[in-house]
Amino acid sequence: MARYIGSLCRICRREGEKLFLKGDRCYTDKCAIERRKYPPGEHGQGYRKLSDYGLQLREKQKVRKMYGILERQFRRYFNEAARKKGVTGETLLQFIESRLDNVVYRMGFAPNRRKARQLIGHGHILVNGRKVNIASYTVKAGDVVEIKESCKGMSDILDSVAKSEHRGIPSWVEVDSVNLKGKVLHIPSREEIQLPVQEQLIVELYSK
């Protein structure tokens, strides 16, 4: 599967805001966007007004990069959300938030979603007592997500849990930081998905 291996800070600078892709570093003054608040590249400091299409495209790209999802998979999420009853944009975000890699990150077991995908791929995560190594696995309300017993002493996981207060634990999950176990209480509502995203722009982009 294709994956992005370039600079994560470059993505944040391109979108013009923090996407918290590097975990704890994003909360310090070492964050690249704090030092250089302009897009990367030779013409990054030049002023350019975006068209309506440009605004819609940038919003879609921002969400994709934030969650680390490829275009084809993101489009599948949108198509599935469009078929569901309710507000398409909100449903889209709920689908993405329900990914296992995002849930592991939200519970504080990993400093960012990229590290969460690595933990899942290496078989360190259990869902309802069973190993799941697919990052895009959809977690449902009531599911219990935990660190595999033999991996609970890993320094990276313990360090992330200790620093998770910086990010905060969302209200739709319940976490036992001592036993490294968490439970999904319910699928988050739009109000609980605290992201600087205008999902309606994504709906408009794909509805053309």
Image: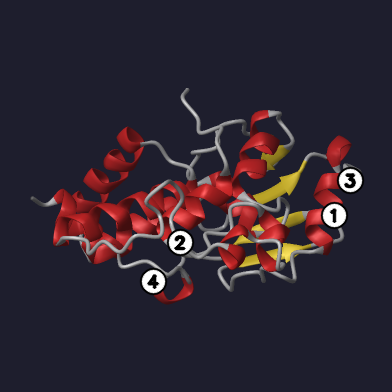
Separation of marks 2 and 3 at Cα, in angstroms:
35 Å
Relative to 63, is 117 on the left or the right?
right
The local crowd at label 2, few if under 14, some if 14 to 19, many if 20 or more residues have their Cα within 10 Å, is many
In front of the other: 178 or 75: 75
Separation of marks 1 and 2 at Cα, in angstroms:
32 Å
Q: In what element is the residue under mark 3?
A: helix
Residue hosting label 1: 159
* In this view, the mark in front (4 or 3): 3
Q: Outermost residue toward the bottom?
A: 191
Q: Position of residue 111 (x, y in %)?
A: 70, 53
Q: Outermost residue toward the top?
A: 1
**The disc labelled 4 sits on which kind of residue?**
Arg
In the picture, the disc for residue 155 is 3
Tell me the residue at 46%/67% (across/down).
188
Q: Are marks 4 and 1 in contact (CB under 8 Å)?
A: no
- Looking at marks 4 and 1 on the same chain, the residue that comes earlier in the sequence is marked by 1
Q: In the rendered image of this protein, does residue 160 appear above or below residue 147?
A: below
The local crowd at label 3, few if under 14, some if 14 to 19, many if 20 or more residues have their Cα within 10 Å, is few
**The disc labelled 1 sits on which kind of residue?**
Asp
Tell me the residue at 20%/57% (across/down).
203
Q: Position of residue 162 (x, y in %)?
A: 84, 62
Q: Are marks 4 and 3 in contact (CB under 8 Å)?
A: no
**The disc labelled 2 sits on which kind of residue?**
Tyr
* In this view, the mark in front (4 or 1): 1
